[in-house]
C-alpha cells in the first residue's frame, strides 16, 4: 500500500513515533545498488566503492566555500552520499525522505551502525539518504587528505556552517532530480550529527520539516553547561 502524507496531523503523529523510538545503534543490513535508481544529473559520478544490498552511491560536485565570492570560492570537490530506494513510495504521493547527516567520520561507519532508519523507513514508505561530512571518507577537498589538512587556511573550510550548506545543496538537488519537491524531509543525527540536525532545522526550515537529534550536546558550550557535568553524573552513578 502506497503511503501518502495529506495532513499536518499525520506528520505530527509521525514525529511522535520517531521520538518515542530509541535511536541506539543496531546492526544495519548490508547495502547495494537498486534496480530502479532514478536518473540523476550529469554532475553525479559513479561511486568508486560499491555497497551490497539496497543502497546506491553517488558523488555530488560540491562548492568548497558557500559564503564567499572570491575567485577561489568557486573551487569544488566531490561529496559522497548514499540513497536507499527500497521503501520509498515516490514523489507523486509525497512520501517522506529521511536524511542522516554525517558527522566526524567516514560514511561507512553510519551505514554499519544506524539500523534505525532501515528498521522504520518501511512503515512510512520513506526514502533514506546518508550524506558524508566534508573532509571525511571520500568527501575530501583539494584532492587528498594531505592537501586538505596542509595548513590552517585549508582546514578553515572544515566547519559546521559549510557542512550544513553542503547538506542543503544535496537535499535540494535530490528532491529536484526525483521530482519530490513536496516530499517532507526529516533530518537525523547523533552526537555532533544530532547538533547538525538541530541546527539544520533552524537554518533551513524550508528544506526540513523536522529533526531527530539523539544525544546531541546542543547546550554543551562554555558558560551554558558546566564543563564537568558529564563526569559529575557518571561519578554519582557509582556512589
Image: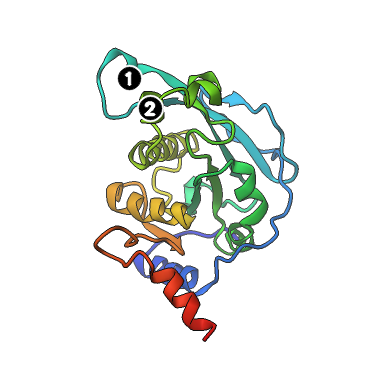
Nearest to the eye among marks 1 and 2: give it.
2
Residue located at (48% from left, 27% from top): 149
**Mark found first going from the N terminus, 1 or 2:** 1
Could you classify mark 1 by the number of other residues whose Cα lies within 10 Å: few (under 14), some (14-19), or many (20 or more)?
Answer: few
Q: Quadrant of the N terminus?
A: bottom right
For residue 131, the mark is none
Report the residue at 28% width, 58% height from top: 222
Q: Considering only vertical position in the picture, is 177 above or below 213?
A: above
Is residue 13 depicted above or below 99 in this figure?
Answer: below
Residue sticking out furthest to the top: 71
Give residue 73's mark: 1
Front residue of this view, candidates 235 and 136: 235
For label 2, the SS is helix
Expressed as whole percent of the image width and height from the top left, the position of residue 46 reads 63, 25
Q: Is residue 58 above or below residue 189?
A: above
For label 1, the SS is helix
Q: Is residue 134 left or right of residue 205?
A: right
Q: Residue at x 43, y 69 (%)?
A: 230
Looking at the image, residue 229 sits to the left or right of residue 101; the answer is left
Q: Is residue 68 left or right of residue 30?
A: left
Residue 105 percent coordinates (x, y): 56, 43
Q: Nearer the viewer, residue 49 or 46?
A: 49
Residue annotated with mark 2: 152
Disc count in the image?
2
Does 175 sit above or below residue 239? above
Amino acid at each position: 500500500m502506497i503511503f501518502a502524507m495529506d495532513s499536518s496531523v499525520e506528520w505530527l503523529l509521525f514525529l511522535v513515533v520517531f521520538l518515542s523510538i530509541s535511536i541506539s545503534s543496531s546492526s544495519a543490513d548490508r547495502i547495494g545498488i537498486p534496480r530502479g535508481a532514478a536518473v540523476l544529473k550529469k554532475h553525479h559520478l559513479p561511486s568508486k566503492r560499491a555497497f551490497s544490498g539496497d543502497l546506491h552511491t553517488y558523488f555530488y560536485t560540491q562548492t568548497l566555500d558557500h559564503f564567499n565570492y572570491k575567485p577561489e570560492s568557486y573551487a569544488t570537490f566531490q561529496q559522497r552520499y548514499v540513497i536507499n530506494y527500497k521503501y520509498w513510495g515516490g514523489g507523486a504521493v509525497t512520501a517522506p525522505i529521511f536524511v542522516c547527516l554525517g558527522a566526524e567520520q567516514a560514511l561507512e561507519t553510519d551505514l554499519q551502525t544506524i539500523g534505525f532508519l532501515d528498521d522504520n523507513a518501511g512503515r512510512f514508505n520513506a526514502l533514506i539518504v546518508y550524506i558524508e561530512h566534508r573532509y571525511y571518507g571520500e568527501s575530501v577537498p583539494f584532492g587528498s587528505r594531505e592537501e586538505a589538512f596542509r595548513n590552517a587556511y585549508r582546514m578553515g573550510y572544515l566547519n559546521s556552517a559549510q557542512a550544513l550548506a553542503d547538506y542543503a545543496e544535496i537535499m535540494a538537488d535530490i528532491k529536484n532530480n526525483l521530482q519530490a519537491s513536496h516530499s517532507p524531509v526529516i533530518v537525523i543525527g547523533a552526537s555532533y550529527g544530532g547538533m547538525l540536525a538541530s541546527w539544520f532545522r533552524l537554518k533551513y526550515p524550508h528544506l526540513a520539516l523536522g529533526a531527530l537529534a539523539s544525544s546531541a550536546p546542543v547546550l554543551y558550550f562554555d558558560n551554558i553547561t558546566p564543563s564537568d557535568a558529564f563526569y559529575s553524573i557518571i561519578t554519582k552513578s557509582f556512589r
